[in-house]
Amino acid sequence: MRLIDAQPRPFALDLAHAALLVIDMQRDFVEPGGFGESLGNDVSPLQAIVPTLAEVLQAWRAAGAWVVHTRESHLPDLSDCPPAKRARGAPKVRIGDPGPMGRLLVRGEPGNAIIAPLAPQPGEAEIDKPGKGAFYATDLQAQLAARGITQLVITGVTTEVCVQSTMREANDRGYECLLLSDATASYFPAFKQATLDMVIAQGGIVGWVAGSQALMKGLA
């Protein structure tokens, strides 16, 4: 066990049974011209975490632990995108519509790719998810179980939507979850802070929160 300085108390990291979860660091959310910007958002807060997350990835890989990447994406015929989801947000363009990087949030399109600095390496899992949470309609739980994973170190975007949804899904399934505060981001900083506060409230009712340096110190 490696003790990680965290809130509301130290997190006992069992590296042999832990996975780093990198949520939705795809061009459609992080870069201009993607789905996130089509909703009227400034993407710069998401871009700001990329160097930190790249550093975390490097340290995690060096420690020999497993990495899981997710992408929010849909089939080209949108058969896995409910009308209620496609209608949300009143964006300039909707899921499946053409954009500067191809059809928005559609698998195989350029905009659906994970950004180059965080690109998956051979042996790392890539999960395409049609919902906000990474467990819904995916084989994530089966992959984690096959590797004996019981802990998740969670990063990515956006904090209050896909990250929080996944963390709550994982908590309900019995996983111990550590969210890295400076390796997650929202288009709305206040929403990010509110999510961090909710995670650790009531003695850590959803999980733990730590900074990336605390994790990397524990890995070292």
Image: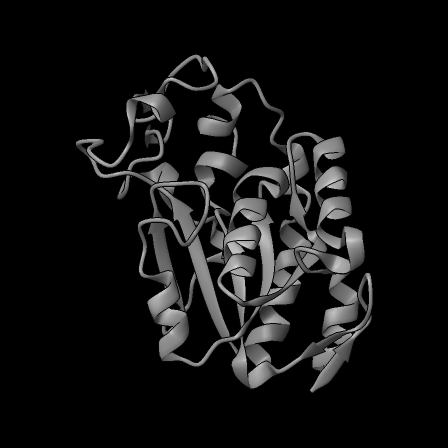
**Which quarter of the rendering shows the N terminus?**
bottom right
Q: Position of residue 97 (x, y in %)?
A: 30, 21
Residue drawn where x is 77% and y is 80% of the image: 3
Q: Quadrant of residue 9?
A: bottom right
Count numbered badges in the picture.
Answer: 0
Q: Nearer the viewer, residue 22 or 88?
A: 88
Q: Position of residue 149 (x, y in %)?
A: 48, 76
Q: Position of residue 131 (x, y in %)?
A: 39, 41
Q: Nearer the viewer, residue 105 or 197?
A: 197
Q: Is residue 68 left or right of residue 82?
A: right
Task: Inspect this view and state whether residue 99 appears.
Answer: no
Instruction: Identify whether 60 is placed above or below 63.
Output: above
Instruction: Identify whether 43 is placed above or below 113.
Output: above
Q: Is residue 144 left or right of residue 154?
A: left
Instruction: Identify whether 208 is placed above or below 144.
Output: above
Q: How is the image coloured?
A: one colour
Residue drawn where x is 38% and y is 37% of the image: 111
Task: Inspect this view and state whether residue 164 appears.
Answer: yes
Q: Is residue 119 left or right of residue 156?
A: left
Q: Nearer the viewer, residue 89 or 121?
A: 89
**Which quarter of the rendering shows the C terminus?**
bottom right
Q: Position of residue 198 (x, y in %)?
A: 73, 45
Instruction: Identify whether 25 is placed above or below 75.
Output: below
Residue drawn where x is 46% and y is 47% of the image: 133
